[in-house]
Amino acid sequence: MTKPRSGEGFLSDRDILIAVITNVIGVATLSLPRLIAADTNSADGWIAIALGGGIAGTLAYIISKIASSFPNQSFLSFASDLISKPLAVFITILFTLQFMVIASFQVREISALAHQYLFDQTPREVISLTFLLVVVFAVSGSRAGIFRLNMLFLPFTIGGLLALILLPVAFMHPENVLPIFHTDFKGYLKATYTTVGSLTGFGIVLFYIALVKNPKNTPKMAVRGMLVVTFFNILLYIICIGTLGNLTTANLFFPTFDLSRSVQIPGSFFERFDSILFVVWTTIVFTTALMAFDLAVMTLMMLFKKLRRIRVILALSPILFFISMLPKDYLELTRISRFMNSFSVIFIVSVTILLGVAYKVKGGKQNG
Amino acid sequence: MRSFSKKGSNGTQNKHNSQNSNESNNQNNTAEVKVPIDTNLNTNIQNLKEMLGQPEDLIIREIKVGSLQKKCSILYISVLVDQNMVQTNISKIVQSSNAQEIMAISEMKNILAVNEIADAVLSGNTVLMLDGVSLIWIMNTAGGDKRSIEEPQSEPVIRGPRAGFIENIDTNISLIRRELKDPNLRFEMHEIGERSKQKLAVCYVEGIINQDILDEVNRRLKSIDVDFVQDSGFVEQWIEDSFLSPFPQILDTERPERVIYSILQGKVGILVDGSPFALIAPVTFGLALQSIDDYSQRWVIGSLLRLLRFLSTFISLFLPAIYVALIAYHPGLIPTQLAFSIAASREGVPFPAIFEALLMAVAFEVLEEAGIRLPKGIGQTIGIVGGIVIGDVAVSAGIVSPAMVIVTSLTAIASFTIPNYSTGVGLRVMRFALIFAASVLGLYGIILIFIMMVVHLVNLKSMGVPYTGPFAPYFLGDLKNLLIRAPVMTLTKRPPYLETEDTKKINNGGQDK
């Protein structure tokens, strides 16, 4: 610990577990019930969420299994081994772009959230910019620091989720959940697809596994992380439907948050509990944006080895801010998030298949 | 005998010369000339006198010793030595025939250059020189007045030892040695201060300490380059990891038992001559919120006190900022009844909440600073001025609202529960940053500053050990000695983040692993 640990292998399995949880839980978690409810009837969406979680978990397992059989090797180097260098470079570039868009999406969503729940007059540019600056400050620190940050914020993440889930329980109406199993097959399919899209954050293991000291158990940890997230998603969804009903859920921008509007805390020290929750959720969105930014920097530095980290960060920040300010309104934002969803599902699935097939073909020789 | 000593001294002289040349390269600004020791007694004395500028209090006694009636001199500075010891032990015995055998002084060593004689004499030693021999004896007779051991002023406890460190390092070392009789207890001595030549002791327990941490501490201590160290705080600033951070990365304490507790955990204690504050490194953030008192109380009490301190730290950091944010940006968040009464009390206050908060916060800081600087006799004046003028009159004059006074005083009281003063001061800085952020962006600004604080903390290290301690990296087992103070029987492990050689607290001197 006292020795400089900037080299490879300073993370433990548990770090990956926590990173997966904090990365996957983000703004997407808040809007997931809306997207699911739009495609399914009453509370049937939970099946789709469970299915999606299962698929995402499997993908996460395959990906981390492949990555962990190349301990302490960067994504680019082992991908070049498996699927020729040009293809690996192409995929890395796509990952860079994806992470940049994810980061700027979070930056934009935080201002959408703030407008809805905290203050509606402050210009969204100010909210996003200050948020981005804090993210930049965090990214410029050490990478070990980022993982420590994840750990410190984990209680906030879990606490924020539990508050969302537990507080409205008293307001649930069982009749909202019924009738069950009335969704058609196409609905399930679409909802599952959306769920997988919201869970693609597990892609980070591809890159972070290179930093794990002993990545033998890491695939299990990644899957466990996905299970935790899926579990919370299902609970959140059922609570949402139970309290608001399917139709309302489908039409609220952040249905999970609006739940807490109705909540009265005993003793009523704070009214409008959603605003307090927003504050907690800022940290959750922050960790997602932070890791996406860090990975964008990391993948860029894989491609251009001579670049200095701080310069990459400073160069990326204005670009991220620009991207985040592109969508004009909520509608456009929703459209973009739909597109991002589709893109990340197709992308991560094809990368998994590509790497998986190449790994099987080139075979067990690296698999020690 | 004589030939032996000559040979020995020659050998060491060579070695010493090489050291000298190194040193003179390092410190060529201090134009010191190393004068070698002459065999002639008078030359040596003349050299020494010249070097010290013919001081009045340099006592030189010429005695004839032994059967040969050899000339010899005893030199010391009268104000620095224990006169009694010099009279009874040295002067008389030297004159007896078998002086070497009976000479019974705590510390004796041989030296080789006149500069060193000067250093020795200035440290309160007595020097014995024989004519015709270049061998010189240094005898530790340091005396002079020192403060008696008193109860520490800066960190009082209700239940616990009353002894505190004093300015004398030998006494401080003895305080530690007396309590901890472990044969593995080590004191590594350094000399700091280019001109002051103060002693500095690094204390640790061999077999527990992580060697990497110890090496790092020693390396940093060797890099110190100052003329004089007025307090251990000076050393602290030289060796801390980040000088930009508002959080102290080294803990200071006046309590010997706290140093002992810490070095038994695998930390390093640093004692500096002239300072009653010992330093402890590496530390983590939670440590500053602990008092050694917690261990003397029963565990439920100790745990509750610790939780209370976390709560009051939170209050002292965030309360004024939250007040400003709620009043200025989110009045809707306050329960209706409370919002009305606050609004009523703010009736007629001419300033916005941010200005009010800053006014009160600054007034409080000024009061606190004035309270420290004032002589104790007129300290009460501050209380009256502060209490009546700021509290009462300001409200009735309609300059600040009563709610703001409540917030400020709550903050003030909460901030005094932080046991470590340096940490408290650091948090005061953060409080102002939070008030500003709250006035610009409300609750959102507060959470952003909070995130920045956490980001800063996770990147901060103390002697290379992550400052966020057992929170992250996650060492769940150690939280029972941080958030709460679990029953003493369960506290069997040393802090894992220190990676100590010997992890079990109950051990046989670190022998079994």
Image (tube, coloured by chain):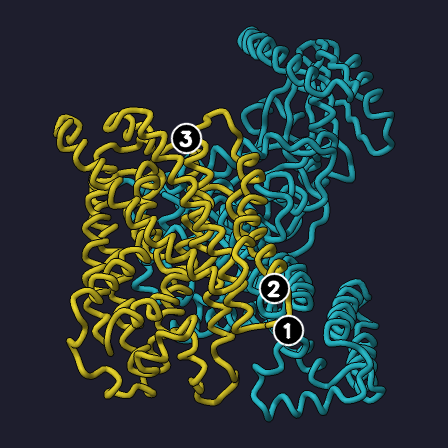
Q: Is residue B203 above or below residue A185?
A: above
Q: Is residue A299 above or below residue A48?
A: above
Tell me if label 2 and label 1 are in contact, CB under 8 Å: yes
Mark 1, Cα crowd under 10 Å, few <14 / some 14-19 / many 20+, is many
Q: Amino acid at mark 1?
A: Ala
Which chain appears yellow?
A: A
Q: Quadrant of residue A237?
A: bottom left
Total marks shown come to 3
Quarter containing the C terminus of chain B: top left
- From this viewpoint, is residue A113 visible? yes
Which chain appears cyan?
A: B
- Mark 2: which secondary structure? helix
- Mark 3: which secondary structure? helix
The one nearer the camera, B368 or B374, is: B368
Q: Amino acid at mark 3?
A: Met
- What whole-number distance in Å separates the C-alpha atoms at marks 2 and 1? 9 Å
Q: Which residue is mark 1?
A: B325
- Give coordinates of residue A262: x percent, y percent: 43, 85
State the residue at coordinates (55%, 47%).
A136
Depth-wise, is mark 3 or mark 1 nearer the camera? 3
The one nearer the camera, A156 or A176, is: A176
- What whole-number distance in Å separates the C-alpha atoms at marks 3 and 1? 43 Å
State the residue at coordinates (49%, 46%).
B282
Q: Amino acid at mark 2?
A: Gly
- What whole-number distance in Å separates the C-alpha atoms at marks 3 and 2? 35 Å
Q: Which residue is mark 2?
A: B445
